[in-house]
Image (cartoon, grey):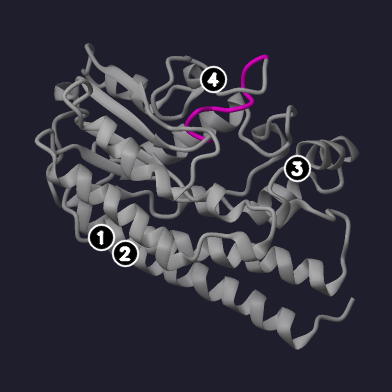
Amino acid sequence: MRMTVRVRRILASVAAAVFVIAGAATGTAAASAATPALPAASVVRMAALGDSISQALMTCSSLVGCPVNSWSTGSSTAVNSHLLRLRAAGATSIVGYNDAVSTAKSALLNSQAQKAVSTAQAAQYVTIEIGANDACTRTVSAMTPTATFKANVQAALATLTASSSAPQIFIASIPSLQRLYEVNKSNISARLTWGLLGLCQSMLVNPTSTKAADVQRRAAVQTRVNEYNAALVQLCAPIVTCRYDGGVVAGYQFVRSDISTRDYFHPSISGQATLAAKTWPMTQWVAQP
């Protein structure tokens, strides 16, 4: 099918956004890595902030969160989360709080941050995975504006950096929604499930359509995700206690085994393990300048 000029422009903007993220992320990683982190063995409290990805939704026997399988704070050895990796590095007394909320958008991130640094939790390490729900809406027009997303995340980071616990912060990039669509778009069960559950309609509605309007819509959603990721790079860069994942989650080419067969969109247990394995090397305790 021939692409219209508008489609070419949208796809070009996607490529441009990815280029910006990749370039900016390199500088962020180098700057952050030069800053000594809290010794791994000294971390006794950590918290996961974000949405259903960090809640490990769709990895248990029901359609609810299953934090035991979380890439961040999970205790499942099949996933080998950041918490378990810190424990292996000497943080034998570490406790993990999963403050992420399924369906959460960036507007809820600051309240999660407040909880993580409260007296009850006083997290010394915080992971953030947020943004998929800001783009996964009923329509393209309902997506969170990039400026609003950036302001929401900035408010949460301000809460974390101003707290007495002064946590080390790790920001994971948002996975490619376009890729998650492409992995299962030819799967009849996946298409039926997407329709029945009404999942991420901005990306997943009319999954087999190759009409220009649908191609443009999907490209517009992915463009917004790329913009969100670029904002995360910019926000993390000036904070000495913050580390961005360098775009490893955004750039990862998910395969079917990474995706839950409960909704064909969220990471499976294998996918959670992949997220942990991909992101851990980018943390303050592993990556070097």
The residue beneath circle 1 is 237
Q: Are marks 2 and 1 in contact (CB under 8 Å)?
A: yes
The disc, 3 or 2, on the residue closer to the chain's N-terminal end is: 3
User: Of the residues tagged 3 and 4, which is closer to the observer?
Assistant: 3
Q: Main secondary structure of the magenta part?
A: loop
Mark 4, Cα crowd under 10 Å, few <14 / some 14-19 / many 20+, is some
Label 2 and label 1: CA atoms lie apart by 5 Å
Residue at image point 54% right, 30% down: 272
Label 4 and label 1: CA atoms lie apart by 31 Å
User: Of the residues tagged 1 and 3, which is closer to the observer?
Assistant: 3
- Amino acid on which disc 3 is placed: Gly
Label 1 and label 3: CA atoms lie apart by 36 Å
In the rendered image, the quadrant that contains the N terminus is: bottom right
User: Element under label 1?
Assistant: loop
Work out whether 33 lies above or below 126.
Answer: below
Q: Is residue 42 left or right of residue 81?
A: left
Q: Position of residue 209 (x, y in %)?
A: 88, 61
Q: Is residue 105 left or right of residue 72?
A: right
| Front residue of 223 and 155 | 155
Residue at image point 74% right, 87% down: 5
- Amino acid on which disc 4 is placed: Cys
Give residue 198's mark: 3
| Residue 174 appears in the rendering | yes
How many tags in the picture?
4
Give the residues drawn in magenta, as a range: 53-61
The residue beneath circle 4 is 66
- Residue sitting farthest toward the top: 93
- Amino acid on which disc 2 is placed: Gln
